[in-house]
Amino acid sequence: MILLTAQEPMERLFDLDWQLLADSVLMIIAIFVLFLLLSYFLFNPARRMLQDRQTRIKNELDDAHNNMKQAAGLKEEYEAKIRDIEKEAEEILSDARRRALENENEIIAKAREEAAHIMERARTEVQLEKQKMADEVKQEMISIATMMAGKAVAASMTADIQDSLVDETLKEIGDDTWLS
């Protein structure tokens, strides 16, 4: 056991000497150089990689935002087109309805006109039939009258009386009967 006596001075406090200080300074310099080298070869590429990634993510977010704006614009444009198409379809349907009504009215008018023509033709045919029947009745009456007159006059009739009777009968009947 070593006992310290009052005569021996203390040489070192906490065991510090020049060698330890020099080694500590060299170690600090070596750590600093190592830090600079690591910073240059490791930290700077890592920072660049993180910065590039951050820039890429920001660009992708901006692109996504722009794409969303474009999509919203396209959606609005397509909705406007759909509204226009619906209006156009409604116009086409109303036009078709209008044309159908016009065709219906035209067909009805033609049918009425044709019915009027048919009725007029029927009236004309009825008139012609009445006239024909009246002419046939006149003819029949003439033939009967001629036959009766022929029997009554046959005994006492001369050629002069017969000629005068024919002329008289023709005058009474008129030219219209013989022309029709």
Image (cartoon, rainbow, N blue to C red):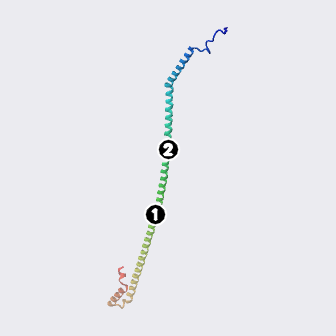
Looking at the picture, tell me which residue is in the foreground, 18 or 133. 18
- Label 1 secondary element: helix
Q: Nearer the viewer, mark 2 or mark 1?
A: 2
Mark 2 Cα shell of 10 Å, populated few (<14), some (14-19), many (≥20) = few
Mark 1 Cα shell of 10 Å, populated few (<14), some (14-19), many (≥20) = few
Taking the view exactly as shown, the residue that stands out farthest to the left is 160
Q: Residue at x 45, y 67 (%)?
A: 109
Q: How many callouts does the rendering have?
A: 2
Question: Going from the N terminus, do you reach mark 2 or mark 1 first?
Answer: 2
Tell me where residue 8 appears, x and y as whole percent.
Answer: 64, 9
- On the image, numbered disc 1 is attached to which residue? 102
Tell me where residue 70 appears, x and y as whole percent.
Answer: 48, 44
Q: Which mark is residue 69?
A: 2
Taking the view exactly as shown, the residue that stands out farthest to the bottom is 156
Tell me where residue 50 appears, x and y as whole percent.
Answer: 51, 31
Q: Are marks 2 and 1 in contact (CB under 8 Å)?
A: no
Q: Label 2 is placed on what type of residue?
A: Lys
Tell me where residue 61 appears, x and y as whole percent.
Answer: 51, 38
Q: Is residue 157 placed above or below 112 in the rendered structure?
A: below
Q: Residue at x 51, y 26 (%)?
A: 43
Is 59 displayed left or right of 140 in the figure? right
Give the distance between the C-alpha atoms of the residues marked 2 and 1, in whole angstroms. 49 Å
Which quadrant would residue 123 be assigned to in this image?
bottom left
Q: Is residue 52 placed above or below 103 in the rendered structure?
A: above
Looking at the picture, tell me which residue is in the foreground, 88 or 37. 37
